[in-house]
Image (spheres, rainbow, N blue to C red):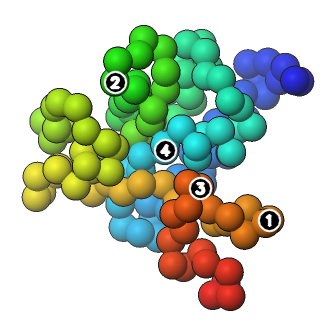
């Protein structure tokens, strides 16, 4: 595996941030939730060490000043999701154990407008975990 170093990681994270900014603009959102498979595909990683997660938070700050790192329940250092937002998540973020999608759906009306990040299918036509937003299905592009 090639080590890209801090500056290379910063460039990768900035590109992902810009992709998220475009999704927020097109979908009229305040922020998006990256699930682990999104980040694995976008960054080419399978393991997320604490330093890399901290770099992600730091690098997303330019466009998304509010960031929450969600870890898998029952594990110490297992990244589940990264939620980035232009507006504060503090008073709207649901507590308790639930999926990222359930958390987003539980945000009260008037709270931040968030949605799951969406990726187009891979070259072989597959989407992440079988979910492919209709606007990205092959034949509709």
Q: CB of mark 1 within 8 Å of CB of mark 3?
A: no
Marks 3 and 2, the one that precedes in the sequence: 2
Locate the N terminus by quadrant: top right
Residue 59 place in picture, x, y as percent: 57, 30
Bin the neighbour count of mark 4 within 10 Å (Cα to Cα): few under 14, some 14-19, many 20 and up: many
Depth check, front residue: 120 or 14: 120
Distance from disc 4 to disc 3, alpha carbons, whole Å, reads 12 Å
Q: CB of mark 4 within 8 Å of CB of mark 3?
A: no
Marks 4 and 3, the one that precedes in the sequence: 4
Relative to 54, does residue 85 appear above or below in the rendering? Answer: below
Residue 84 place in picture, x, y as percent: 41, 41
Residue 86: name its quadrant: top left
Judged from the image, the secondary structure of the residue bearing numbered disc 2 is: loop
The numbered dot on residue 128 is 3
Relative to 109, does residue 48 appear above or below in the rendering? Answer: above
Judged from the image, the secondary structure of the residue bearing numbered disc 4 is: strand
Residue corresponding to mark 2: 73
Residue corresponding to mark 4: 34
Residue 36 place in picture, x, y as percent: 54, 38
Q: CB of mark 3 within 8 Å of CB of mark 2?
A: no
Marks 2 and 1, the one that precedes in the sequence: 2
Q: Residue furthest right?
A: 2
Q: Is residue 105 visible?
A: yes
Bin the neighbour count of mark 3 within 10 Å (Cα to Cα): few under 14, some 14-19, many 20 and up: some
Distance from disc 1 to disc 3, alpha carbons, whole Å, reads 12 Å
Q: CB of mark 4 within 8 Å of CB of mark 2?
A: no
Q: How many numbered marks have been drawn onto this rendered protein structure? A: 4
Judged from the image, the secondary structure of the residue bearing numbered disc 3 is: helix
Residue corresponding to mark 1: 123
Q: Residue at x 54, y 68 (%)?
A: 132
Marks 4 and 2, the one that precedes in the sequence: 4
Locate the C terminus by quadrant: bottom right
């Amino acid at each position: 595996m090639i080590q890209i170093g801090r500056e290379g990681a910063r460039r990768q994270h900035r590109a992902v941030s810009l992709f998220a900014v475009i999704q927020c603009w097109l979908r009229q959102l305040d922020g998006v939730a990256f699930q682990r498979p999104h980040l694995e595909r976008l960054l080419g990683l399978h393991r997320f060490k604490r330093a890399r997660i901290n770099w992600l938070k730091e690098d997303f700050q330019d466009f998304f000043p509010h960031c929450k790192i969600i870890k898998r329940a029952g594990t110490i250092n297992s990244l589940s999701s990264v939620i980035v937002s232009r507006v504060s998540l503090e008073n709207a973020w649901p507590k308790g154990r639930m999926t990222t999608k359930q958390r987003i759906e539980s945000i009260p009306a008037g709270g931040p407008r968030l949605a799951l990040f969406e990726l187009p299918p891979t070259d072989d036509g597959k989407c992440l975990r079988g979910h492919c937003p209709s606007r990205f299905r092959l034949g509709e592009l």
